[in-house]
Amino acid sequence: MIKKNLKYVLNIAFILVIGWLTLRLLFHGEEFSDIVNDLHLADKSWLALGVVFVFLFVAGESTIIKYMLRFFDVKIPFVRCLKYSFIGFFFSCITPSASGGQPAQMYYMKKDGIKIGFSTLIMLMITIAYKAVLVLLGVFFLVFNFSFVKLHVGKLWWLLAVGFVLNIAYILGLVFIFYKPLWARKMGIKLINFLTRVKILKEKNNEKYINKIKRICDNYMIGAEYIKSNVHTVVNIFLITIVQRIFLLAVTWIVYKAYGLSGTSFFGIVTIQTMIGIAVEMLPLPGAVGVTEGCFTYMFMGVFTEKLVRPAMLLSRGLSFYVLLVMSAAVTLGAHLIVLRKDKKNGVLNNAEEKDNEEGYKK
């Protein structure tokens, strides 16, 4: 537990250090007072709306959690679903490729009495919808707004291509596990054994990884059956996810309006932001820090102008990542303290029961 917490602390430190170095690089040669003045040019009422959009983005996932739990006859208040979403986004923000979010959500759901089978299926559906919607939006914008994408992506086409390949490969991997879970299990076990033989994985961890492969394939098999028998529900989840994604993608449009700019449509700004998301989300960096800021500055240069693109990046990234990170951290800390208090209380009660039993036995 201490080792895992240390890893999270190091990831947060990495985000802060890389963020600071990125800002030093992007704002090299500029006075701090000038940067602050440029930030103050933005309309505060529009920025407040940006915070609302970020909250609605989180609430979108909470809506899916609430929606699916209803089918399992699990009745919990929406506020608790918000708690799970904030916890998930916090751990996603601080772990490479957002890998730590869903295990944390499942842990806290279990603490609230939600069966691990239910939470696993919910997280599985959210993952598939979240990734698939991003790729579908990307393909849609490429088809219907190709010249605009080509103009603003410029020399970063290679990074966008890598992003598409990684995202599509991830989705195809999920589809393969869905339709051929037994094949996927055999291939996974062979891969683990091979990596163990060539000393990439430790011999003592071989069985643990194999059991993990089996568990993942079993969960996906259950998920495949659920999708086949609940097509209407799956469609609704995808529609909610589209709205959820657009709320976060639109934060940059909010910043654009906050500076009183015009000339680029909502559709155009969301198009560029989608391309940035595809390019960076699968990269093994906590919060994709550094590369996201660089992509924003490059791709939005012609939209915000050279004078405002960097302060716009600070505001957009600040709202969509750092504000979300702080909000999620506060909720996660509160939830963790409650869990610790409950565990301590249950421990006291269990010790008291054991003591009563021992005294009864002596009598």
Image: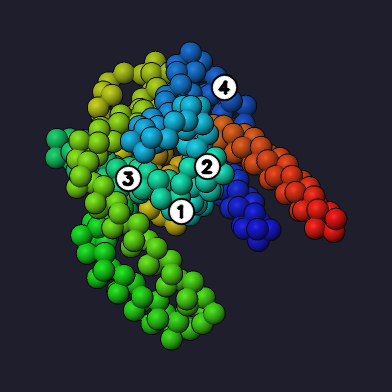
The residue labelled by disc 1 is 99
Mark 4 vs mark 2: give the one in front: 2
Picture quadrant where residue 68 is located: top left
The percent position of residue 318, horizontal first and vertical second, equals: 51, 32
- Residue type marked 2: Gly
Q: Is residue 14 left or right of residue 89?
A: right
- Residue type marked 1: Ser
Quadrant where the C terminus lies? Answer: bottom right
Indicate which disc residue 125 carries.
3
Residue at coordinates 53% horizontally, 24% vertically from top-left? Answer: 39
Q: At numbered mark 1, what does the secondary structure look like: helix, strand or loop?
A: loop
The residue labelled by disc 2 is 113
Q: Is residue 31 left or right of residue 180?
A: right
- Residue type marked 3: Met
Tell me the crowding category of disc 2: few under 14, some 14 to 19, or many 20 or more residues within 10 angstroms, Cα based.
few
Q: Is residue 229 left or right of residue 363?
A: left
Indicate which disc residue 37 carries.
4
Quadrant where the N terminus lies? Answer: bottom right
Q: Are marks 4 and 1 in contact (CB under 8 Å)?
A: no
